[in-house]
Image: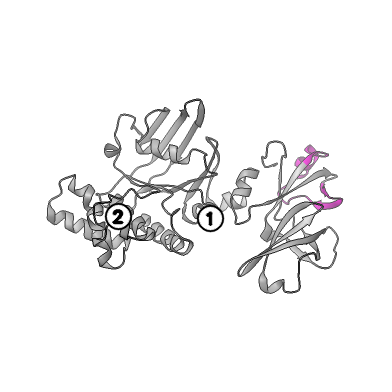
Amino acid sequence: MADISLRNITKHYGNNLILDNISLDIKDREFFCITGPSGGGKTTLLRIIAGLDSDYSGKVFFNGEDVAEMSSAQRNIAMVFQDYALYPNMVARENIAFPLRIRKYDQERLDSKVADTIKQVDIGVDKYLDYLPKKLSAGHQQRVATGRAIVRDDPKVFLLDEPLSNLDAKIRMNTRTYLKQLVTDIKSTTIYVTADSSEALSLADRLAVLDRGKFVQVDRPFDMYFKPRSTLVADFFGVLGMNFLKGRMKKGKILLQGTEINKPVYFNKDTADRIEGNEVLLGIRPEDISFSKQFSNGSLEVEVELIQAFPPKADLLCSLNGKTVHTVAFIKNIKDIAETDILYLSIPETKTYLFDPKIGELIE
């Protein structure tokens, strides 16, 4: 097992800065996800931790020991790649056994370890173990790759680079559940890279959002979703992201399209006074907006432009003076609503956030 510390990691590809002086601590046996927009440096960072990339500055520590001079094998890591990287000329069983063969395990010990691993990854029908990778589904290839990674005795660190990205939605959901249970069973420190925000939220003990080589926020899943520190994080998590509406602070309220909206409940008077008269971005998640066909004080008048169903819910795309606002409702509750209808949106101050429109950071 291992706790991992990264200190001042900087990486360039030519003139392009990929990782910008980042530091991070990951606890022993923690399931840690690194997520964020594509091209942010996630896979590059994972390769540095794995020892597959040595052309960088900074330090990587396992249990307080600098591993700069250690190979991947010496670091005792297990890794699953996005493309699985199975040996095409070996059947599934031999792919799983290969790391033990090159370590010259005796046959009895090898057979025992492989059998235990096959049970752990739950490959299903035994005949699949005698198939070459090209005959296996993407889901079975993923499980064989995972089995090959964990078959060794007690890897210190388990690294996964977008292992579910090639799977269809249903298999992906089932595999996500099995991976979480597997990691709990093997008790290794796990670093999981994914661009899928929902995957990161459902799997991680803690997670980091990496964007353009910088950690934007490192937090627990709950706080990442409900306490975003920036518009990037707020918009990245959630099926539809977050709505952002331009307004201005006026006498302790937010003036939005001529309507006064109450300031967020987390605001105190000093904060409101400090930004009096300033432009702000009001953030509200689609599922937190309520609506009615009847006007009420403080509500915003919108026109329904489009209704997109994703059963059992639907996304109502509404126009607020040319600005699209998303709101979500159960399909059974919007039977009397049609495109071009006028609705009145209510924005609860218990669910809103205010961001600086210039730098995108949360105003506190």
Q: Secondary structure at mark 2?
A: helix
Magenta region: which residues?
253-279
Vertical side of 155 occupied by 20: above or below: above
Please name whichever residue, 275 or 231, is drawn nearer the observer in this view of the structure.
231
Residue 19 is left or right of residue 223, and the answer is: left
Q: Which residue is pictured at 84% across the width and 52% down the height?
A: 260
Residue 8 image offset from top left, x and y in percent = 47, 29
Residue 361 is left or right of residue 56, and the answer is: right
- What residue sits right under mark 1 in the picture? 198
Q: Secondary structure at mark 1?
A: helix
Q: Residues within 10 Å of mark 1 (few under 14, many from 20)?
A: some
Q: Which residue is pictured at 71% across the width and 52% down the height?
A: 352
Residue 2 is left or right of residue 214, and the answer is: left
Q: Which residue is pictured at 23% across the width and 57% down the height?
A: 93
Q: State the CA–CA distance, disc 2 to disc 1.
A: 24 Å
State the image quarter where residue 250 is shown. top right
Vertical side of 23 occupied by 322: above or below: below
Q: Is 132 within the magenta? A: no
For the C terminus, the quadrant is: top right
Disc ID at residue 158: none
Q: Which residue is pictured at 52% across the width and 54% down the height?
A: 201
**Amino acid type, residue under disc 2 in the picture:** Gly
Please name whichever residue, 19 or 337, is drawn nearer the observer in this view of the structure.
337
- Say whether residue 134 is visible: yes
Q: Is 266 within the magenta? A: yes
Q: Residues within 10 Å of mark 2 (few under 14, many from 20)?
A: many
Count of numbered circles on the image: 2
Residue 358 image offset from top left, x and y in percent = 71, 36
State the image quarter where residue 311 is shown. bottom right
- What residue sits right under mark 2 in the picture? 147
